[in-house]
Amino acid sequence: MSDANALHERKHVWRDEILLIVSLIVFVGIVYTLDGTLQPAFTSSTFY
Amino acid sequence: MTGVFLAIVPAAIWLVFFYLQDRAEPEPKGFVLGVFALGALLAAGVGIPLVNNVFRTSHWIYTDTLTTILGGILVVGFTQEFLKYAAVRYSIYNSGEFDEPTDGVIYATAAGLGYATVLNIQFVVSNGGVDLGAGVIRIAVVALAQAAFSGITGYFLGRAKFESEQIWWMPLGITLAAIFNGIFNWLQGIVTQPRITLSGTTTNTWMGLVLASAVALATTGLILWLVRRNLKSMQAGK
């Protein structure tokens, strides 16, 4: 390993983490809204 | 199938972002997916059987507050954090592809999301499916929490590889991640506790998501600050 690599930082790592958090909140919001609006009727086999 | 599909979504989201942004100096996609799979396999083959069948935590962990916190840290926390650490340490860590301190965070997050995916699938399967609204919140909470705690271990792994740290360095990292894990689970139990109202019993699952998001944001911010501070001090010392 080189010193240059040891001092390097992959900046996208932090963006990925923030995007994951924001996306999961949006994802939960979408699923929650769709569930409330459409009220799908799952059978045990479709949901399992 | 819907429940299992929902359980996979958080990891899929992270992997898509990762692959879209990791262009300048890309990590080999096979290695990231491999560590993700290893985290998932360790959860399915070791972590979940150990916690559920050997320690049988569901029988005693919610006895009282102290037991919940100590059991959450010493049994659940240490098992999960050690296995996620092992998924990175005994695979990619010794490879030339682990060539920057932040790679520790990347690979540990992949292992954590693999672990979270199996935890979520196991939750859906063992409950014979879940309520869509509450289920998707739980899936997001587990993914956010596991990714955040893995980030702590990843930071310690990154420094352990590129700096000559003391022998206690990695045990300290795993211990801190296990403590965060145990305390988070205890706090989550409190904020989502069912409340009896005039209209019946209500569970506040949204508070769990708020807590997990806050913990994930705070942990990411803390690790970012620690990595940058460490890089500055290394550059100053060159």
Image (cartoon, rainbow, N blue to C red):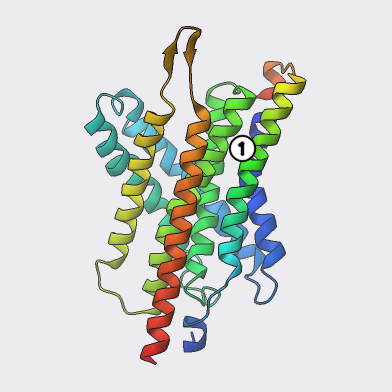
Decide which of B87, B104 is in the foreground and name it: B104
Does residue B40 lie above or below B162 as drawn? Answer: above
Decide which of B38, B143 is in the foreground and name it: B143
Residue lying at the far left of the rendered structure: B66
Q: Is residue B148 left or right of residue B190?
A: right
Expressed as whole percent of the image width and height from the top left, the position of residue B165 reads 30, 75
Does residue B15 lie above or below B132 as drawn? Answer: below
Quadrant containing the C terminus of chain B in the rendered view: bottom left
Residue lying at the far front of the rendered structure: B198
Chain identity of mark 1? B
Expressed as whole percent of the image width and height from the top left, the position of residue B230 reads 39, 76
Residue B222 appears in view? yes
Does residue A43 lie above or below A4 as drawn? Answer: above
Decide which of B148, B154 is in the foreground and name it: B148
Q: Residue at x 42, y 61 (%)?
A: B222
Residue lying at the far right of the rendered structure: A38
Quadrant containing the N terminus of chain B in the rendered view: top right
Kindly identify the amino acid type of the residue bearing the numbered disc 1.
Ala
According to the image, label 1 marks what residue? B7
Decide which of B57, B189 is in the foreground and name it: B189
Q: Secondary structure at mark 1?
A: helix
Q: Residue at x 42, y 17 (%)?
A: B195
Expressed as whole percent of the image width and height from the top left, the position of residue B96 reads 53, 78
Which image quadrant for residue B175? Answer: bottom left
Q: Residue at x 33, y 30 (%)?
A: B57
Residue lying at the far bottom of the rendered structure: B238
Disc 1 packing (10 Å; few <14; some 14–19; many ≥20): many
Expressed as whole percent of the image width and height from the top left, the position of residue B45 reads 47, 42
